[in-house]
Image: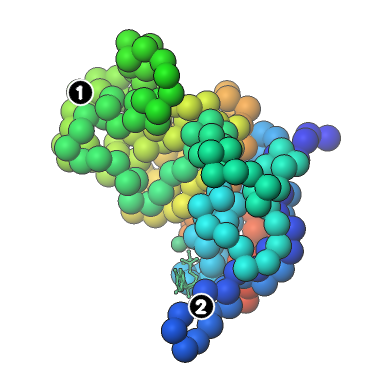
Amino acid sequence: MNNVLLHCEKLSKTFRDVGHEVPVLQGITLKVYDHEMIAITGKSGSGKSTLLQLLGGLDQPTSGEIYFNGKAYHSHSASQLDKLHNQEIGFIYQFHHLLPEFSALDNVCMPLLLRKIPIKEVQEQGRAMLAEVGLSDRSTHRIAELSGGERQRVAIARALVTQPSCVLADEPTGNLDQENAEHIFSLMKRLYQSKRISFVIVTHDLSLAKQCDRSFEVSSGALNELA
Ligand SMILES: Nc1ncnc2c1ncn2[C@@H]1O[C@H](COP(=O)(O)OP(=O)(O)O)[C@@H](O)[C@H]1O
Ligand SMILES: [Mg+2]
């Protein structure tokens, strides 16, 4: 049996706005093992993004705990959490969050610039990662000049360039047509297989979700495994 990489236990999240409360997640428990690909589906507004943000340590739960490699997030210092984000966890979003005026290569290299490695080495790693997503010939193009599918490939390269052990993707194909969505999904699957990392993918697309090792649905604050 593989090790548990990411684990949340009885996770609840309630947003408190002035005058009212929005309970979103209620007692969610999930174990993500080393080298598995899981999908999280659910209606819009059901709490998928909230769950992913919590799993990534970008937001705090109202109650419950999240562990990465057995260590609880709440026991990490701010700098340990930063390190976790820069070295262990990669994020991919629906609207890629790339810097439009910078080149594809600069965008991919960005997370490595926080590390104290020579710029030449950073660029070598960035170029190698762009090659893996099939974009060697676009490395000097600005993001603004790339198609939606190409931008998503750059976002994948940026998430993976740090060699994380887990990638969290929030509707990474949500902004693409079916053909491009399938291309991007196959690319993620190929990288997941070759790099032996774990993937948690939020997707509306049940045909993509079915291709994962396990799939879940967020509904009424709970997480249910789909058959
Ligand atoms: N920062 C916030 N403050 C208040 N409510 C929020 C906040 N973020 C999300 N919500 C609410 O939580 C619910 C779940 O949102 P979200 O996790 O984004 O859903 P999904 O990703 O499944 O579409 C929604 O009702 C949303 O309005
Ligand atoms: Mg969402």
Q: Is residue 202 visible?
A: no
Q: Nearer the viewer, mark 2 or mark 1?
A: 2
Horizontal relation, residue 19 to residue 136: left or right:
right
On screen, residue 202 above or below 44: above
Foreground pick, 51 / 201: 51
What whole-number distance in Å separates the C-alpha atoms at marks 2 and 1? Answer: 44 Å
Residue occupying the point 47% across, 52% down: 170
Horizontal relation, residue 10 to residue 175: left or right:
right
User: Dot 2: within a 10 Å radius of its alpha carbon, few (fewer than 14), some, or many (20 or more) residues?
Assistant: few
Q: Is residue 49 visible?
A: yes
Q: Residue 222, image x and y in percent?
A: 67, 70
In the image, what residue type sits under mark 2? Arg
Residue farthest toward the bottom in the current orientation of the protein = 19
Residue farthest toward the right in the current orientation of the protein = 1
**Image quarter of the N terminus:** top right
Residue occupying the point 22% across, 37% down: 143
Give the structural element (helix, strand or loop) at label 2: strand
Q: Which residue is mark 2?
A: 16
Q: Which mark is residue 161?
A: none
Residue occupying the point 49% across, 34% down: 86
Q: Residue 147, image x and y in percent?
A: 23, 40
Q: Which residue is mark 1?
A: 140
The answer as to whether callout 2 falls within 8 Å of ligand 1 is: yes
Q: Earlier in the sequence, mark 2 or mark 1?
A: 2
User: Dot 1: within a 10 Å radius of its alpha carbon, few (fewer than 14), some, or many (20 or more) residues?
Assistant: few
Q: Residue 70, image x and y in percent?
A: 75, 41
On screen, residue 148 above or below 107: below
Foreground pick, 185 / 156: 156
In the image, what residue type sits under mark 1? Thr
